[in-house]
Amino acid sequence: MARPTSRSAAAILARPKREVRAGATTRHNAAVTRRTGSADLPLHHGHVPPWLATRMAALGRVMAEAIVHHYGRDELLRRLAHPFWFQSFGAVMGMDWHSSGMTTSVVGALQRGLAPIRHELGIYVCGGKGLRGRETPAQLARLGDETGLDAQALTQASRLVAKVDGAAVQDGYDLYLHAFIAAADGRWCAVQQGMNPRRREARRYHWLSEGLDSFLDSPHAAIDGRSHGVIVNLADARAADSRSASLALVVGGPDRTVATLRRLHAASSPTLHLFPLPDPQPAPEQSLPHLQMPAHHDIRASDVVLGRLHAALRAAAERGPKDFGELLLTPGVGARTVAALALVAEVIHGAPSRFSDPARFAMAHGGKDGHPFPVPLEVYDQTLSVLSQAMARARLGNDDRLWALARLDAQARWLERAASRARPAAFPFPSATPA
């Protein structure tokens, strides 16, 4: 699995915490509006059972609340626009760690979970799969009536996003999902997904309004999908001349276009070569991270950065008795729940470079199809209980329990650095399987 470099990943996600807490309005690095990586998403069929869908909505809600509480709404939008974080977010919620269905499930979980507190949180999830995606303009119009947001501008952004990925980027993937997440201040991110049934693959596209100057000059925050060579991408900054020529052909009428095609047909061959030359490749230092989700269901050692998993489990063992036995004081919380909480805490607080191995986060609550193990409902419910109680206290001005999670994550980072010279020799999944 190719993983992002620290330099490329750091340009994608969060501003420094002190800057967010100070309410800084500094314009984010322009790199966030450009393509930040790609990933393979094998097509999977099936549905999320109600018992898991309900829990995913609850966990998605409390994690989103915690991120907004600690880092602000802009940070939640940045993370949703980050393909590695998005995949890790779905994995920690118990969805299949690598499948195309994760996109639909995560979007649906956020819609259901955030609906009761959307005005309080200032985050509004619109759209979805199929017909739900086509309802986005109507949903944004109602949102404008309720909140005073500029619904016309948001609707135009939503439509342009869909048009760019559905028409200007012709890569063989037909869009079937459009999710548009707006914030109370008018900023937004978008997540879309296309399908290629012949290849049995999906491709996910990420957008972020922060720093977006044009919808037609390399606007994507990220595109997830397998590379199949050269594609038509009229939204690339290098395609400005092609866009101008296309507009000139339309304005000039059909005669010139047909005459040009007839001349090319007669001069060369019956087949017009649409791609005579490949697009120039970026310089090595500008290469983007690529997340390749494999076709196999089981989680293997090659799918996980073992040092990170080892550090999280060890931090849970060492910090659990102090932070969760004495501070959280939640009945029934055992070592297995603390281990799950350590991975949840990393998704909430982790730096962008830490999400190159989404499979690791499936170790928190397993997976819908039983990989790496069936979802342990008792552990899942205890995780929800701890987070919900911590968030309830934070709403009242006492965020000591939320910061206990942050300390747990910080301890794991420290242990990982300390153990960098002595990585674990064995793949620890069997011993980590819940009883």
Image (spheres, rainbow, N blue to C red):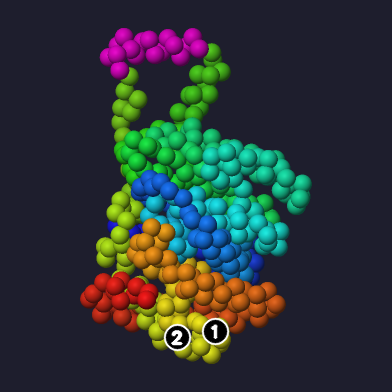
Which amino acid type is marked by label 2?
Arg
Q: Is residue 146 left or right of residue 177?
A: right
**Relative to 65, is 222 above or below?**
above
The disc at residue 331 is 1
Q: Position of residue 67 (x, y in %)?
A: 57, 67
Q: Position of residue 41 (x, y in %)?
A: 37, 49
| Residue 344 among magenta residues | no
Q: How many marks?
A: 2
Determine which quarter of the picture holds residue 262: top left
Q: Position of residue 115 (x, y in %)?
A: 65, 57
Residue at the image point whose x is 68% and y is 60% from the top: 116
Q: Position of residue 53 (x, y in %)?
A: 52, 58
**Relative to 35, is 134 above or below?**
above
Residue linked to disc 2:
319
- Between label 2 and label 1, give the one nearer the viewer: 1
Most common SS among magenta residues: helix
Magenta residues (range): 254-271
- Tell me if residue 182 can be seen: yes
Q: Secondary structure at mark 2?
A: helix
- The residues bearing labels 2 and 1 have C-alpha atoms spaced at a distance of 17 Å
Residue at the image point whose x is 34% and y is 53% from the top: 293
- State the quadrant of the N terminus: bottom left
